[in-house]
Image (tube, rainbow, N blue to C red):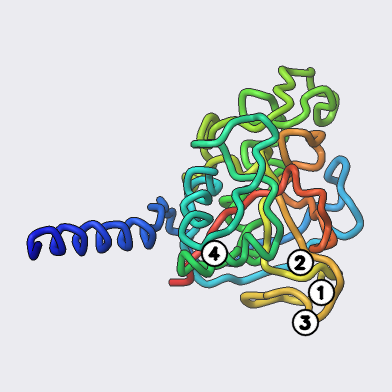
Amino acid sequence: MKAYLIIIFQLCFIGHLLAQAKPIIKWVNIPAGTFTMGSPLNEIDRCKNETPHQVTLSAFKMSKYEVTFKQYDLFCEATGRAKPRDAGWGRGNRPVINVSWDEANAFASWMGCRLPTEAEWEYACRAGTTTPFNAGSNFTTFQANYNSNYPYNKNKKGKYRAKTLPVGCFPPNAWGLYDMHGNTWEYCSDLYGDYPGELQINPKGPESGSYRVCRGGSCGNYAQFCRSAYRYFFDPDSSNLLGMGIRLVQSN
C-alpha cells in the first residue's frame, strides 16, 4: 500500500511538472544603437504616418522565430485556455494565429517575457538596413511569405501560398531573425499614435489611445504592407484575428 501511494504521488508530481513546462525560446541578442525609424520620403508606397525620426535603444533579446502553435498550445494546456483555431493550415511549427492582443500579452507574461515595442520591432527587423525590406529594395517569394499577386515596385509576381508556412522557411535577416516580413503580423506593446519629430530614447509609444500596433505583414498581405516601416493599427477588441501572431522580447 505504501509503495502504491508513493507511485501515485510521483505520477502526480510528474503531471504537475508537465503542466508547468514552458516552451524553449531561441533568442537573438540585439545590440544597442541609434537608427532612423520610419521611411525615407522617397520610399515607394510609404505612408504619411511613417515620419522618419531618430531613436536610440538599449540592447535586448528577441525571439529568433515567431511563436508557434506548438509553443502556444502548451500555454493553453497549462492555463486552461481554449486553443486558438488554425484555419485549417496546420499547427505544430507554424506560427500561432487567431490570438488577441490580450492573449498574446498574457502568453508573453507567462513566459517571463514581453511584446516588443514598435521601435524595438522596426530596429530588429531592419538589422542596420535603410531599404524598404531588410533584404533590400526588391522583395520576392523566395524571401518571405506574402501575397505575391501584388508585388512591390513592379517586381514580378511569385507563388502565392495563401496560408502560413512553418517558421524559418526563408533566409534570416542580418541579425539572424526569421520571418520579420510576412507569414503573420506581429503584435507590439504600443498604443498607436503619431511619431514625434525629436530624438527618442527607448520609446514605449503614447500613454493613451484606442488602437494597438502590429508589424511585418502576413501571408495574405500585399508586399507594400510588409515593409520594415509599415505600421498597422487595429482595435484590440476586434474578432478578426486570422493573421495575428506573436514574437517575444526580453530586456537585458
Query: Where's the C terminus, which quadrant?
Result: bottom left
* Mark 2 touches mark 1? (CB < 8 Å): yes
To which residue does mark 1 refer?
196
To which residue does mark 2 refer?
53
Instruction: Report crowding for label 3: few under 14, some 14 to 19, many 20 or more residues within 10 A (C-alpha).
Output: few
The label shown at residue 207 is: 3
Question: What is the C-alpha distance between the residues marked 1 and 4?
Answer: 28 Å
Please, is residue 123 above or below residue 155 in the view?
below
Image point (79%, 18%), residue name = 157
Q: Amino acid at mark 3?
A: Glu
Please, is residue 195 above or below residue 72 in the view?
below
- Depth check, mark 4 against mark 3: the one in front is 4
Question: What is the C-alpha distance between the residues marked 3 and 1?
Answer: 13 Å
- Depth check, mark 3 against mark 2: the one in front is 3
Q: Amino acid at mark 4?
A: Ala
Q: Amino acid at mark 1?
A: Pro
Question: What is the C-alpha distance between the residues marked 2 and 4?
Answer: 29 Å
Image point (69%, 76%), residue name = 200
The label shown at residue 108 is: 4
Mark earlier in primary sequence (3, 2): 2
* Quarter where residue 204 is shown: bottom right
Image point (77%, 58%), residue name = 38
Query: Where's the N terminus, which quadrant?
Result: bottom left
